[in-house]
Image: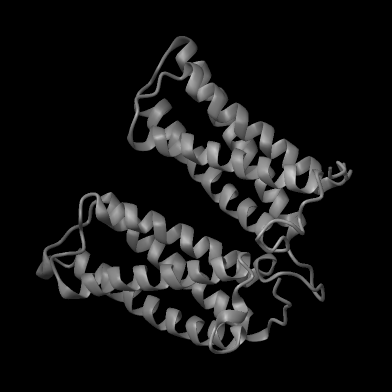
C-alpha cells in the first residue's frame, strides 16, 4: 500500500486553493444559479468541473507518490493541466458575468449565487496562474518541455485556436471565398500540430518521431509563423472589404483579433525555441 506523502510547499497550497475555488464555482452555479442547459452555461460549468477534476487527480497522484506509475511525463502533465485550467477559468470568469449577470439581470438569491460563482471563478483563475508561475522552468533549470515558455505558448495557441473555431463556425463565416477557407485550413493545421506537440510531451512519445524533436519544433515553428501571417492578412481583407461581401459583426472582428494574437504567440514561440535547451520528460 503506497504511503501518503504530504509535502508542505507553496505549490501544494496553490493547488489546494485552485481545487477549492473551482469546486465552489461550479457547485454554487449548479445549485442555485438557475442556469438553462446548453450554450455558455454548459461551457462555464465544464471549465470549472474539468479544472477541479484534473487538479484533484494531480493532488491524489502526488499525495500517494504514484508519479512513477502513471503513464505520462510528470514533469509535463501537472503544468499543462494548470495552464489549460487557468485559461478555462479565465474564460469562464469573463463569459459568466457577461451572459448571466449583465444580459439576464437576475435578482434575489439567483443573482447572489451567480455573483459568488463569478468571484470564485476569478479566484480559481488567479490560483491556477499562480501554480503555473511556481511550476514553470527557471533560467538554467533542467525541466520538461511543457514547463518552458515554448511549451506554455503551445497551450495558449491551442486554446485560442479553439475559441477561433467557435467564433467562425456558429454561424459559418469562412465559406464564401477560397482565401477564408485557407484561413480555416491554417487554424486547423496549426492547432493539430501544436496539440500533437503537447500530447507527445505529456505522453513521453517525442522519441517516436522520425527526426529529432528539436528539428521538428524548429521546422513546425517557422511553418506556423508563415501560415498564420497569411491568415492574419487575409482574414480581415476578405471579411471587412465590401468588394468581397463585407461581414464585420462582433464574432468576425474577434476572430481577426485572436488570429493576430496567435500569430504573435507563434512568433514568440519560434524565437524561444531557437534558443532553448531543454530535457524532455
Q: Residue furthest top?
A: 108
Q: Nearer the viewer, residue 73 or 102?
A: 73
Image quadrant holding the N terminus, namely top right
Tell me which corner region of the image, top left, top right, bottom left or bottom right, holds residue 56. Answer: top right
Image quadrant in which you'd find residue 126: top right
Image quarter where the C terminus lies is: bottom right
Q: Nearer the viewer, residue 129 or 105?
A: 129
Residue 221, x across and y down, in percent: 50, 81
Residue plotted at (74% across, 38% down)? 16
User: Up-down: is 219 above or below 239?
Assistant: below
Q: Is residue 197 left or right of residue 183?
A: right
Residue displayed at 50% across by 74% down: 266
- Residue located at (57% from left, 23% from top): 116
Q: Is residue 37 left or right of residue 71?
A: left
From the viewer's perspective, is 25 left or right of 188? Answer: right
In the picture, residue 39 is in which quadrant?
A: top left
Residue 57 at x, y = what percent?
A: 67, 44
Count of picture labels: 0
Amino acid at each position: 500500500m503506497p504511503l501518503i506523502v504530504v509535502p508542505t510547499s507553496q505549490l501544494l497550497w496553490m493547488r489546494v486553493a485552485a481545487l477549492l475555488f473551482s469546486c465552489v464555482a461550479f457547485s454554487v452555479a449548479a445549485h442555485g444559479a438557475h442556469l438553462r442547459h446548453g450554450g455558455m452555461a454548459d461551457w462555464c460549468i465544464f471549465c470549472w468541473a474539468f479544472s477541479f477534476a484534473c487538479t484533484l487527480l494531480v493532488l491524489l497522484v502526488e499525495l500517494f507518490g504514484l508519479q512513477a506509475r502513471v503513464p505520462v511525463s510528470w514533469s509535463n502533465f501537472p503544468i499543462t493541466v494548470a495552464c489549460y485550467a487557468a485559461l478555462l477559468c479565465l474564460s469562464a470568469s469573463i463569459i459568466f458575468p457577461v451572459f448571466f449577470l449583465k444580459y439576464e439581470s437576475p435578482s434575489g438569491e439567483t443573482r447572489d449565487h451567480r455573483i459568488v460563482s463569478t468571484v470564485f471563478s476569478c479566484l480559481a483563475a488567479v490560483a491556477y496562474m499562480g501554480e503555473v508561475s511556481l511550476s514553470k522552468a527557471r533560467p538554467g533549470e533542467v525541466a520538461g518541455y511543457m514547463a518552458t515558455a515554448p511549451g506554455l505558448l503551445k497551450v495558449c495557441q491551442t486554446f485560442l485556436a479553439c475559441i477561433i473555431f467557435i467564433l467562425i463556425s456558429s454561424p459559418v463565416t469562412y465559406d464564401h471565398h477560397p482565401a477564408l477557407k485557407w484561413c480555416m485550413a491554417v487554424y486547423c493545421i496549426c492547432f493539430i500540430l501544436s496539440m500533437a506537440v503537447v500530447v507527445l510531451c505529456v505522453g513521453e512519445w517525442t522519441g517516436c518521431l522520425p527526426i529529432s524533436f528539436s528539428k521538428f519544433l524548429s521546422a513546425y515553428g517557422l511553418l506556423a509563423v508563415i501560415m498564420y501571417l497569411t491568415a492574419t492578412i487575409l482574414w480581415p481583407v476578405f471579411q471587412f472589404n465590401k468588394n468581397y461581401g463585407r461581414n464585420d459583426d462582433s464574432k468576425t472582428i474577434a476572430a481577426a483579433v485572436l488570429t493576430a494574437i496567435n500569430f504573435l504567440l507563434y512568433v514568440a514561440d519560434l524565437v524561444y525555441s531557437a534558443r532553448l535547451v531543454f530535457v524532455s520528460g
